Image (cartoon, helix red, strand yellow):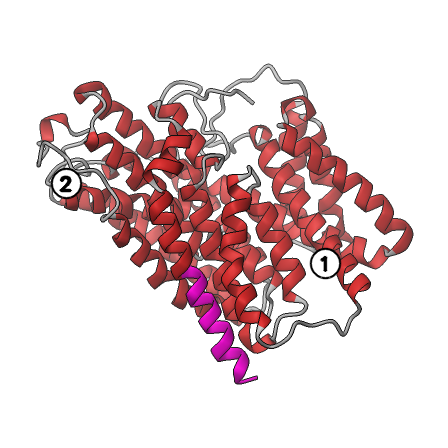
């Protein structure tokens, strides 16, 4: 996997970690094998005709990952080695836990591939250039809010692709005006906007993981609490930006200057597309009884199929994107899901099935969950790792009536980690495209906002756990 991806829009470019993939050629051997086995794992997760077919997804994705071993980052290789050691141990001592871990891995792998497939398909949309029109125009505060909320909106279907698209726009403004408070505030807005999706999007991996490990919690309950917090976080971010010497910027230096209906229509199309996917997800999980992660995957793949069919009717070329470049994402996601189930099972066996915390300790634990994820991110741990382990370990001992407090802690901690730590994929991506230092973005630009937001998130999670748990 290249260390310095091209800016979006350049021939052969792709966005690392997420999700805007193109058909760029790569000298990596077994590229086709990697992509084929990734799609087979997706099918195994989408259409489990039996328990055995669902278990088949885990070895399929393992083949897809191992075929690209030389492209894997060190953390991905370490996770795979841990998967091999823990899987061997589980096979000898707790075969049922191994089966549970394999099934969970298949479901979450299908979710990751489906979300990235949706992102790759939408990343080629001609609407993306129009969506950027006018975002850099106007006075500082409205401009900042437009950028941060637009990034959050685009991140719902595009995931990391939204960071790539917006970072490329910032780079274009930098080329016209140079580095300034305006472009630094825009970079802040993009990082914080991406957090919005992680905290409150029905299609985000963080929400799906939380609901996977907390099956008694409903998506609408979690989003009803996390959405206001995400909006408050973006609004609070406006207080943590630089003063801009130039109060306004006109359309002549904006990356896009479409106006009126020509600018509004792409937003409406994207909103309708996202809304249809969310409705499909809620319908399949709520009325259809489908596990939430599978409901998201099925809705995303259905939307992709409809989009490709529509392009075909217009005579445009249609092809599935290669899944070969996402080996690191699959290794981290699948490995963390696998280890999370085994760690939870092993922990319960060591502590005993009747283990529990004192009543006062649950609100304290809920307060600490976002902080644990954030400081794990400061040490370089992906929130997939900490979120999966925390969700798997705590869900089995958490009061069922207070799952909302734990779920909120997981998604809020996830969002604050990806926006406020220097090793998150979106921070590194923004750094590579714009040249801004990821350490500076996390420690100088966002640290105070992150600390205040962590206090608020911890307090909300703790209060929810105390109030709901007290009524159990």
Magenta stretch, main secondary structure class: helix
User: How many neighbours does mark 1 have within 10 angstroms: few (below 14), some (14-19), or many (20 or more)?
Assistant: many
Q: Where 420 sits versus 277, above or below?
A: above
Q: Position of residue 214 (x, y in %)?
A: 59, 65
Under circle 1, the secondary element is helix
Q: Position of residue 350 (x, y in %)?
A: 81, 62
Q: Position of residue 271 (x, y in %)?
A: 31, 52
Q: Where 415 sits versus 96, above or below?
A: above
| Residue 362 badge | none
Please give the range of residues in magenta: 457-472
Residue drawn at the location 18% of the way across and 20% of the way down: 176
Q: Is residue 26 left or right of residue 353?
A: left
From the viewer's side, name the closer residue of 226 and 274: 226
Between the residue at mark 2 and the residue at mark 1, the CA separation in whole angstroms equals 48 Å
Report whether residue 217 is seen. no
Quick check: is 132 in the magenta stretch?
Answer: no
Residue drawn at the location 59% of the way across and 70% of the way down: 361
Q: Which residue is mark 2?
A: 140
Residue drawn at the location 57% of the way across and 49% of the way down: 111
From the viewer's side, name the closer residue of 32 and 155: 155
| Residue 344 badge | 1
Under circle 2, the secondary element is helix
Q: Position of residue 258 (x, y in %)?
A: 14, 35
């Amino acid at each position: 996997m290249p260390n310095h991806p091209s800016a979006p829009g350049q021939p052969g470019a792709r966005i690392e970690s997420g999700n805007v993939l193109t058909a760029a050629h790569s000298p990596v051997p077994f590229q086709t094998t990697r992509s084929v086995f990734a799609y087979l794992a997706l099918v195994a997760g989408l259409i489990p005709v039996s328990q055995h077919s669902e278990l088949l997804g885990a070895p399929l994705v393992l083949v897809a990952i191992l075929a690209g071993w030389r492209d894997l980052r060190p953390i991905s290789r370490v996770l795979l080695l841990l998967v091999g050691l823990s899987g061997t141990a589980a096979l000898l001592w707790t075969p049922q836990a191994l089966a549970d871990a394999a099934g969970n891995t298949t479901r979450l792998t299908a979710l990751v591939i489906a979300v990235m497939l949706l992102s790759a398909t939408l990343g080629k949309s001609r609407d993306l250039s129009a969506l950027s029109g006018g975002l850099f125009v106007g006075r500082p505060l409205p401009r900042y809010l437009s950028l941060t909320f637009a990034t959050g909106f685009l991140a719902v279907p595009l995931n990391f692709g939204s960071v790539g698209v917006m970072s490329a726009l910032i780079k274009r403004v930098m080329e016209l005006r140079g580095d300034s408070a305006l472009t630094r505030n825009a970079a802040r807005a993009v990082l914080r906007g991406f957090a919005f999706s992680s905290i409150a999007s029905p299609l985000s991996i963080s929400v799906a993981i939380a609901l996977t490990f907390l099956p008694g919690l409903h998506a609408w309950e979690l989003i009803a609490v996390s959405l206001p917090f995400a909006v408050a976080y973006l609004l609070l971010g406006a207080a943590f930006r630089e003063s801009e010497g130039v109060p306004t910027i006109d359309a002549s230096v904006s990356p896009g200057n479409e106006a009126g209906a020509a600018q509004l229509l792409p937003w409406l199309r994207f909103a309708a597309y996202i809304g249809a996917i969310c409705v499909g997800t809620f319908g399949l999980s709520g009325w259809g009884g489908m596990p939430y992660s599978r409901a998201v995957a099925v809705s995303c793949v259905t939307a992709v199929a409809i989009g490709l069919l529509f392009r075909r009717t217009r005579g445009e070329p249609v092809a599935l994107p290669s899944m070969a470049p996402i080996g690191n994402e699959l290794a981290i996601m699948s490995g963390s899901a696998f280890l999370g189930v085994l760690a939870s099972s092993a922990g319960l066996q060591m502590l005993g099935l009747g283990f529990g915390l004192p009543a006062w300790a649950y609100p304290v634990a809920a307060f600490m969950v976002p902080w644990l994820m954030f400081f794990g991110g400061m040490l370089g741990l992906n929130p997939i790792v900490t979120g999966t382990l925390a969700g798997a370990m705590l869900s089995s001992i958490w009061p069922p009536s207070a799952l909302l407090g734990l779920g909120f802690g997981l998604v809020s901690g996830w969002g604050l980690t990806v926006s406020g730590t220097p090793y998150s994929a979106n921070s590194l991506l923004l750094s590579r495209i714009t040249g801004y230092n990821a350490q500076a973005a996390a420690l100088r630009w966002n640290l105070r906002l992150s600390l205040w937001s962590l206090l608020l998130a911890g307090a909300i999670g703790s209060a929810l756990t105390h109030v709901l748990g007290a009524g159990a």
